Amino acid sequence: MFVASEGNDHIALVRYGPGGARVERDRKIGTNPTELVGPHGIYVSPDGKWYYVTTAHGAPNGALWKFSAETGEQVGRVELGRFPATLQVSPDGHYAWVVNFNLYGDMVPSSVSVVYTGDMLEVRRIPTCVMPHGSRLSPDGRHQYSACMMNDELVEIAADSLAVSRHFMLKPGAERGMSGPPAAMAIAKPGGPHSDAPGGGGGHDMAPPKAADVG
């Protein structure tokens, strides 16, 4: 099992056996020894050959890293949005889906990054909602889901179009599903000054959530 330690930038391979657990391998992750990058999400490819780690901190953006599961050698890295967090790799191993949580940024819609793992290339950054978190794919890999931490919503992205296909309101007593992106994204001005996604999601048209809508 691979374990990411966000507080000290270490990735450990932990083995379990008859005698209990032991750390078989440990490595440091980052580009600057004096600044923490905060490894957050970690996921092993379906074939077990690679593992991927998101690092939340950057200047200002974080990144997705690719390592050999056998040797621990770094084989790739790509910069993503602000505070990349949860990730999942598609069943065929070709794409990593990463939510850009944007924990420390303005309360504006953020995005989900889709990375082609072969070349570690971000092929699309899809605007979704405020503070998307959790990244889960359907078993067939055709849809990706992430929760909106500040909007009581769940967003569905279609893998074939790389666009938001539906969103679901989760507020108790008002649960329902609707086609297309959340209303906040539909009215956001493309390319706004605080947008985390190229060409969309400025967010200044979006009112902050009311106290009764959160929690």
Image (spheres, helix red, strand yellow):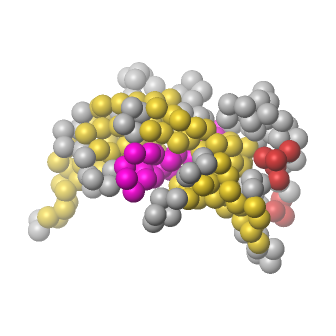
Look at 45% across and 66% down and name the residue there: 139
Q: For this view, does 155 lie left or right of residue 191?
A: left
Q: Is residue 185 above or below residue 22?
A: above
Q: For this view, does 98 lie left or right of residue 166?
A: left
On the image, the x and y values in percent for residue 125 come to 61, 38
Look at 82% across and 53% down and name the residue there: 183
On the image, the x and y values in percent for residue 164 come to 67, 52
> From this viewpoint, is residue 153 visible?
no
Foreground residue among 170 and 49: 49
Q: Quadrant of the C terminus?
A: bottom right
Q: Which residues are magenta?
A: 86-104
Foreground residue among 80 and 4: 80
Q: Quadrant of residue 8?
A: top left
Asked if the stretch drawn in magenta spans residue 93, the answer is yes
On the image, the x and y values in percent for residue 131 come to 67, 48
| Total numbered circles | 0
Look at 67% across and 61% down and name the residue there: 154
Q: Is residue 90 above or below residue 9?
A: below
Look at 48% across and 39% down and name the residue there: 115
Of all residues, the one furthest to the bottom in this rendering is 173
Asked if the stretch drawn in magenta spans residue 151, the answer is no
> From this viewpoint, is residue 142 visible?
yes
Q: For this view, does 93 lie left or right of residue 69?
A: right
